[in-house]
Image: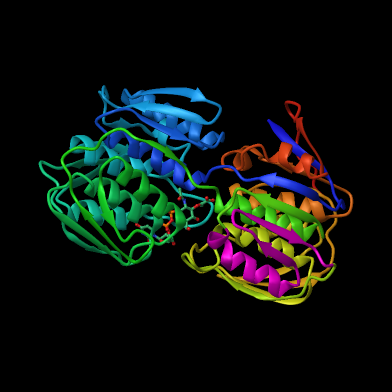
C-alpha cells in the first residue's frame, strides 16, 4: 500500500503533455477482438485499467504484445473463450465492453455483471436492451451475464438515458450484424467518436458518431489496422484546474481544445486566463477566483468526471457556488474528505453548496474513487501544509505518471509506502 504526501502552496509552472484517453482505450482494446487480423494500437495509456484489459484479452486467447513504449499489437485470431469471470471483471468497470465485442465477434459472451460503485447505482439495462433489440438472448446467472445470438440483425434502438457505455457497446455488437442499426439518443463524448473511428479503420461502416443519431451498417469482415488513441480530455481538464487552484501557469500540450470548451468557459468565468492553441491550452492564474455555478451534463456539457476537481477549486474561490451533479446520484462522497481540510460544503442530494473560504489546510485524506482522488491531489497542492492521500490505487487506474508530471511542474509530491498495520490518523 502506498500514499501520496504533498506539501502544498506551490505555484505550479511549466509544460505537461497529456496521455491517451482512458475511456477510449478501455473500449478500443476489447473492440480489437472484432477484427479478423492483428491490430496495432498506438498511444495506449500506461494505467492499471489497461493492464486489466490486457489480462482479460489474454485470458480470452488473444495475443497481446507491447511493440513500442505506448504501442501494443493485438492478434485476436485464436480466441478460445467467451468468458470474463468476476475475478477479472471486477477490477475494471468497463469490462462490460467485452459483452458487445464478444457478441459481435462470436455470437456469444459470458461476462460478469459490473458490481456496485461509489458513484451510485450504475445499471446496464440500456446496454442489455440494445443487445436484445439486435436479437440476443440474455440471462443472468450467479452474477454472470450470458448473451447468445444465432444472428444479430440491425435494428432501431432508442436509449431511455444518454449512456456512454451503452452507445459504445451497441456499436461494437452492431458492426457485424446483418443490415442497418440506428441508435437514437446516443452519447456524444469524444471517446464515442474515437471508438467509431477505430472501428471504421478496421472496415466498419459507422456514421454520425458525435451526434445523437448513429447509423451502423453491418459488414461481414473487419480487417487489421493501425490506430492512435486521442488525448485524455479529463486528464487535460484536471491539469487546467490544477493550474487554476495553484495560481499557476501551465501549458498543457497534446490536447484537443474543442473537447475542453465547457471547462475553458467555466474557468474563464471563475477568473482564470485560458488561451487555446491548435493542440495545446495555457492556463494562468490571475490571483482571482470567483464563485460560479456548475451543472454536469452529457457532452458537450460540463463533464461529471471533472465535478470533484472543480468543486475543490470552488472551495478556494470567494463567494457561494452551487454544483449540481446531474449524471450520477452519489458523486459527492469525497466532500467529507474536503471538509477535513477545512472546506465548507453542504450537500443535499444532487446539489452541493460550496462556501468559498479561499483556503484549505493539509490533512490525512483518502481517495474514494479515481476522480475524487484527483480532487484530493488538487486540494493538497493548494492547501497550506502537508496532505497525505491514501487509496492511491484508484488514482493510478486512470492518471498516467501523475506524480512525475506534477513534480516536473514544481509540485512537492512523493509516493511513500504505508507500513503494514498502519492505521490512518484521524484529524
Ligand atoms: N445508465 C442507466 N442505464 C444504463 C447505462 C447508464 O440508467 O444502461 C445511467 C447511469 O446510471 C448514469 C447515466 O446513465 O446515471 C450515465 O451513465 P453512462 O452509461 O454514460 O456511464 P458509463 O458508460 O458507465 C462512462 C465513463 C465514466 C463517466 C460516464 C459519464 C467509461 C469507462 N466510463 O461511464 O467515467 O463518468 O461515462 O460520462 O467510459 C471515470 O472515468 O472516472 C468515469 C467514471
Q: Nearer the viewer, residue 421 or 170?
A: 170
**Where is residue 13 drawn, in percent x and y?**
81, 50
**Scheme of image coloration:** rainbow
**Where is residue 240 drawn, in percent x and y?**
69, 57
- Magenta run includes residue 66: no
Q: Quadrant of the N terminus?
A: top right
Would you say 261 lies left or right of 374 here?
left
Q: Quadrant of ligand 1?
A: bottom left
Q: Nearer the viewer, residue 82 or 34?
A: 34
Would you say 124 lies left or right of 151 here?
right
- Residue at left offset 65%, top offset 54%: 238
Q: Nearer the viewer, residue 132 or 258?
A: 258
Would you say 76 lies left or right of 236 here?
left
- Residue at left offset 11%, top offset 44%: 151
- Residue at left offset 57%, top offset 42%: 398
Query: Picture quarter containing residue 286?
Result: bottom right
**Where is residue 196 drawn, in percent x and y?**
34, 50
- Residue at left offset 62%, top offset 37%: 393
**Where is residue 187 drawn, in percent x and y?**
38, 61
Would you say 199 lies left or right of 90 here?
left
- Magenta run includes residue 285: yes
Q: Is residue 321 above or below residue 146?
A: below
- Which span of residues is magenta-colored? 257-286
Q: Nearer the viewer, residue 140 or 209?
A: 209
Visible residue check, residue 144? no
Q: Is residue 346 above or below residue 276?
A: below
Query: Picture quarter containing residue 278?
Result: bottom right
Q: Is residue 128 above or below residue 262?
A: above
Q: Residue furthest front?
A: 278
Amino acid at each position: 500500500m502506498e500514499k501520496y504526501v504533498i506539501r502544498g502552496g506551490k505555484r505550479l509552472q511549466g509544460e505537461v503533455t497529456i496521455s491517451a484517453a482512458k475511456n477510449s482505450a478501455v473500449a478500443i482494446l476489447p473492440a480489437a477482438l472484432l477484427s479478423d487480423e492483428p491490430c496495432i494500437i498506438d498511444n495506449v495509456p500506461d494505467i492499471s485499467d489497461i493492464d486489466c484489459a490486457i489480462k482479460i484479452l489474454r485470458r480470452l486467447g488473444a495475443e497481446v504484445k507491447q511493440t513500442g513504449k505506448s504501442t501494443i499489437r493485438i492478434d485476436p485470431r485464436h480466441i478460445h473463450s467467451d468468458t470474463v469471470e468476476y475475478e477479472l471483471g471486477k477490477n475494471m468497470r468497463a469490462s462490460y465492453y467485452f459483452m458487445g465485442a464478444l457478441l459481435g465477434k462470436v455470437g456469444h459472451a459470458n461476462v460478469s455483471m459490473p458490481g456496485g460503485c461509489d458513484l451510485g447505482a450504475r445499471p446496464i439495462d440500456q446496454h442489455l436492451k440494445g443487445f436484445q433489440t439486435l436479437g440476443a438472448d440474455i440471462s443472468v446467472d450467479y452474477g454472470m451475464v450470458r448473451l447468445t445470438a444465432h444472428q444479430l440483425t440491425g435494428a432501431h434502438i432508442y436509449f431511455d438515458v444518454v449512456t456512454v457505455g451503452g452507445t459504445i457497446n451497441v456499436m461494437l455488437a452492431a458492426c457485424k450484424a446483418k443490415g442497418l442499426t440506428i441508435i437514437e439518443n446516443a452519447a456524444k463524448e469524444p471517446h464515442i467518436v474515437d471508438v467509431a473511428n477505430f472501428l471504421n479503420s478496421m472496415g466498419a461502416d459507422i456514421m454520425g458518431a458525435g451526434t445523437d443519431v448513429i447509423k451502423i451498417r453491418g459488414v461481414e469482415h473487419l480487417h487489421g489496422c493501425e490506430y492512435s488513441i486521442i488525448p485524455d480530455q479529463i486528464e487535460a481538464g484536471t491539469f487546467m484546474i490544477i493550474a487554476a487552484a495553484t495560481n499557476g501557469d501551465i501549458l498543457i500540450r497534446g490536447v484537443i481544445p474543442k473537447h475542453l470548451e465547457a471547462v475553458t468557459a467555466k474557468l474563464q468565468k471563475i477568473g482564470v486566463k485560458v488561451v487555446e492553441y491548435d493542440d495545446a491550452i495555457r492556463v494562468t492564474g490571475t490571483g482571482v477566483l470567483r464563485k460560479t455555478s456548475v451543472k454536469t451534463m452529457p457532452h458537450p456539457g460540463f463533464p461529471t468526471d471533472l465535478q470533484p476537481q472543480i468543486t475543490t477549486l470552488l472551495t478556494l474561490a470567494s463567494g457561494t457556488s452551487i454544483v449540481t451533479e446531474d449524471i450520477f446520484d452519489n458523486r459527492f462522497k469525497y466532500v467529507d474528505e474536503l471538509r477535513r481540510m477545512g472546506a465548507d460544503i453542504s450537500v443535499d442530494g444532487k446539489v452541493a453548496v460550496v462556501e468559498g473560504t479561499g483556503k484549505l489546510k493539509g490533512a490525512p485524506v483518502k481517495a474514494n474513487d479515481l476522480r475524487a482522488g484527483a480532487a484530493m491531489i488538487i486540494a493538497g497542492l493548494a492547501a497550506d501544509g502537508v496532505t497525505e492521500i491514501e487509496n492511491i490505487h484508484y488514482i493510478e487506474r486512470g492518471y498516467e505518471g501523475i506524480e512525475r508530471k506534477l513534480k516536473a511542474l514544481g509540485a512537492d509530491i512523493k509516493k511513500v509506502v504505508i507500513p503494514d498495520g498502519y492505521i490512518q490518523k484521524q484529524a
